[in-house]
């Protein structure tokens, strides 16, 4: 379970990195396309989602960002939380909860950004927090002493 | 507590916590599933808008448990809501739909055609004529229908697969008959898996001219559509050039068949003659303003070809334009205006023909998005009044009711909306009352 916890926490961190990468990839592709005379509007992106024909290949970055953000990352964070119940390590649940909370906040900020672009700026900032926390959650399992063993030792030392 | 029971508790707690998370999710997932076959008439909950429950003709079957059951009164079959079957057709057209690869701007795009082209042929009629369209689906695997977008047709002719008719499978046929009572710019499109089919080109324009004819000397239809990210007019990824003598007044019928809004503007002055097939009352000259056409919307512009040998130009977004003028004449692309033409205050007021002081019913329509399950799939779904599909309100009205609807979008995203069989007039927007011509629409953006 500890391995599963670590893997899930690292996966969340890796996904955050992927999210940042695909967005910048998409925006770079968009600039290149616009420089070449392309015009981007709602119909262009909706048309590419519906017919699968991309105006420029980097549009894929926007679609990947949406699928990762709505389905994959919340799913991973939820799994991490469930796995944390079984790891028997002090703080494992707490840090899984923080990761999960930041994922929820991240999603809200992402959608808020559609209406208030400044929400998008906070979405970028919160991504760094989520990345750091997920990485820490995974790494601390490697160094922290197993909480269950501590309990066993304490119990053994106390006469019943 | 003994160490044994503590150990049991320690083992049980993580399981209980997991169940506490998974069980509600599983329940929500299970509750969101819908049967493979269901009736839209049984969907959601009834909303009478504070008016009396319509006694007759209520179509809400109420077969599903927990749904309101209507008193059993003889209701009219939808298949009976047709045009006079004995009247001969004035305009007859054969419509053959195919699934095929389109060539747009030199690119091959998987799509659909109507009579071998996309867009399909323009169907034209004079106000009051009976249009008869014989649809034959040659090769569209998912089936097709035809919806007459913006035309208030008898319900059996509305072309909504699964609601007003069954889908027309490959090899199948269906005959649409309706009297074109309204003059204006409309379009037709498939209403079976309409997202990919309309995006892929299964549509065409429909123009109904008034009995008295139009005041302009020339008219041009311009269908703005995006095929696989390529902006086109009338199916071509290039400007539409229309020859016209200097001084000619031209009616340009712009039809937005995309899922997103577009802006249109001109290099000189124009008048906006009609919105969604309804004439604007006393339209005035406009300059340096753009007009927003939401998904499915139409706008009729009147422009005049300049007398100096140059052309008039209407931009349909930055990418494409309609250029009208003498052969060889051109016009540089005008910059996109900063301001939009506000239809709330355009033209002159005119009587609506009904009393708004005492509406029969009032409805609320709150659009938002929230996380949840729809048909067993998790996601960030659109909601109506806080609920997800299929738990949506079914607004019940009686023929002749005056209905006031308050529509609010809190999602932060554009949501287009199109009314079938009805039109709505905008009374106020964000608390500002309408002060111009009655602004009738069948498509709107919130």
Image (tube, helix red, strand yellow):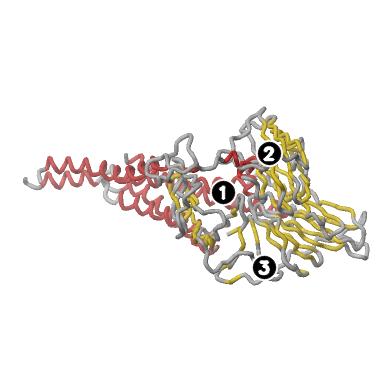
Q: Which chain letter matches label 2? A: B
Residue A22 — which label?
A: 1
Position of the C terminus of chain A, as image quadrant, is top left
**Residue A124 in view:** no
The nearer-to-camera label among 2 and 3 is: 2
Please name whichever residue, B399 or B373, is drawn nearer the observer in this view of the structure: B399
Residue B37 horizontal side relative to residue B111, left or right = left
Q: Secondary structure at mark 3?
A: loop
Q: Chain of mark 1?
A: A
B122 sits to left or right of B199? right
Q: Secondary structure at mark 2?
A: loop
Q: Position of residue B417 (x, y in %)?
A: 59, 54
User: Residue B267 lies in what quarter of the image?
Assistant: bottom right
> Residue B248, position in %: x, y?
89, 61
Q: Which residue is mark 2?
A: B85
Q: Disc 3 or disc 1, which is closer to the eye?
A: 3
- Subunit of label 3: B
What is the x, y in percent for residue B54?
A: 48, 52
- Front-lying residue, B153 or B418: B153
Q: Is residue B53 visible?
A: yes
Residue to which mark 3 is pinned: B342
Looking at marks 2 and 3 on the same chain, the residue that comes earlier in the sequence is marked by 2
Cα separation between marks 3 and 1: 38 Å
Where does the image place residue B119, in percent across and percent down from the top left?
Answer: 74, 43
Q: Are marks 3 and 1 on the same chain?
A: no
């Amino acid at each position: 379970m500890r391995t599963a916890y670590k893997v899930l926490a690292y996966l969340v961190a890796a996904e955050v990195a992927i999210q940042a990468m695909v967005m910048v990839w998409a925006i770079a592709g968009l600039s290149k396309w616009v420089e070449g005379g392309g015009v981007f509007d709602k119909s262009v992106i909706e048309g590419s989602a519906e017919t699968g024909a991309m105006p420029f290949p980097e549009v894929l970055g926007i679609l990947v960002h949406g699928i990762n953000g709505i389905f994959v990352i919340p799913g991973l964070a939820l799994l991490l939380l469930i796995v944390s119940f079984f790891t028997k390590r002090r703080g494992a649940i707490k840090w899984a909860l923080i990761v999960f909370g930041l994922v929820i906040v991240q999603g809200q900020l992402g959608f808020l950004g559609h209406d208030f672009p400044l929400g998008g700026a906070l979405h970028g900032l919160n991504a760094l927090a989520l990345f750091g926390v997920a990485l820490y959650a995974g790494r601390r399992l490697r160094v922290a002493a197993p909480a269950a063993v501590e309990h066993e030792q304490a119990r053994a030392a106390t006469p019943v | 507590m003994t160490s044994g029971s503590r150990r049991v508790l320690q083992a049980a707690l993580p399981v209980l916590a997991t169940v506490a998370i998974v069980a509600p999710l599983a329940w929500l997932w299970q509750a969101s599933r819908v049967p493979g076959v269901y009736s839209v008439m049984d969907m959601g909950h009834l909303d009478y808008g504070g008016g009396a429950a319509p006694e007759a003709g209520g179509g809400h079957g109420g077969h599903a448990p927990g749904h309101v059951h209507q008193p059993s009164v003889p209701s009219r079959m939808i298949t009976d809501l047709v045009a006079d079957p004995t009247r001969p057709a004035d305009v007859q057209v054969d419509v053959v739909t195919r699934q095929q690869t389109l060539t747009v701007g030199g690119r091959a795009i998987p799509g659909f055609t109507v009579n071998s082209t996309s867009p399909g042929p323009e169907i034209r009629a004079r106000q009051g004529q009976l249009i008869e369209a014989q649809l034959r689906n040659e090769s569209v695997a998912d089936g097709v229908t035809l919806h007459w977008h913006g035309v208030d047709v008898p319900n059996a002719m509305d072309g909504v697969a699964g609601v007003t008719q069954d889908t027309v499978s490959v090899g199948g046929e269906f005959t649409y008959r309706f009297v074109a009572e309204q003059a204006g710019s409309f379009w037709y499109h498939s209403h079976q898996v309409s997202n990919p089919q309309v995006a892929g080109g299964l549509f065409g324009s429909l123009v109904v001219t008034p009995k008295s004819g139009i005041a302009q000397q020339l008219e041009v239809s311009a269908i703005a559509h995006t095929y696989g990210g390529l902006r086109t007019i009338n199916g071509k990824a290039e400007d539409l050039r229309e020859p016209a003598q200097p001084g000619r007044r031209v009616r340009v019928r712009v039809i937005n068949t995309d899922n997103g809004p577009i802006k249109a503007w001109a290099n000189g002055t124009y008048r906006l003659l009609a919105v969604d097939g309804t004439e604007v009352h006393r339209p005035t000259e406009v300059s340096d303003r753009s007009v927003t056409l939401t998904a499915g919307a139409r706008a009729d512009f009147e422009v005049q070809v300049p007398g100096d040998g140059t052309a008039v130009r209407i931009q349909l977004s930055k990418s494409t334009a309609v250029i009208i003028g003498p052969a060889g004449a051109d016009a540089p692309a005008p910059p996109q205006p900063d301001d939009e033409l506000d239809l709330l205050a355009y033209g002159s007021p005119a009587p609506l023909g009904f009393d708004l002081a005492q509406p029969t019913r009032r409805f609320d329509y709150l659009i938002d998005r929230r996380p949840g399950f729809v048909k067993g799939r998790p996601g960030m779904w659109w909601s109506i009044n806080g609920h997800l599909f299929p738990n949506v309100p079914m607004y019940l009205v009686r023929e002749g009711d005056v209905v006031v609807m308050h529509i609010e979008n809190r999602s932060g995203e554009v949501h287009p909306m199109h009314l079938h069989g009805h039109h709505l007039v905008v009374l106020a927007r964000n608390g500002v009352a309408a002060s111009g011509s009655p602004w009738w629409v069948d498509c709107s953006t919130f």
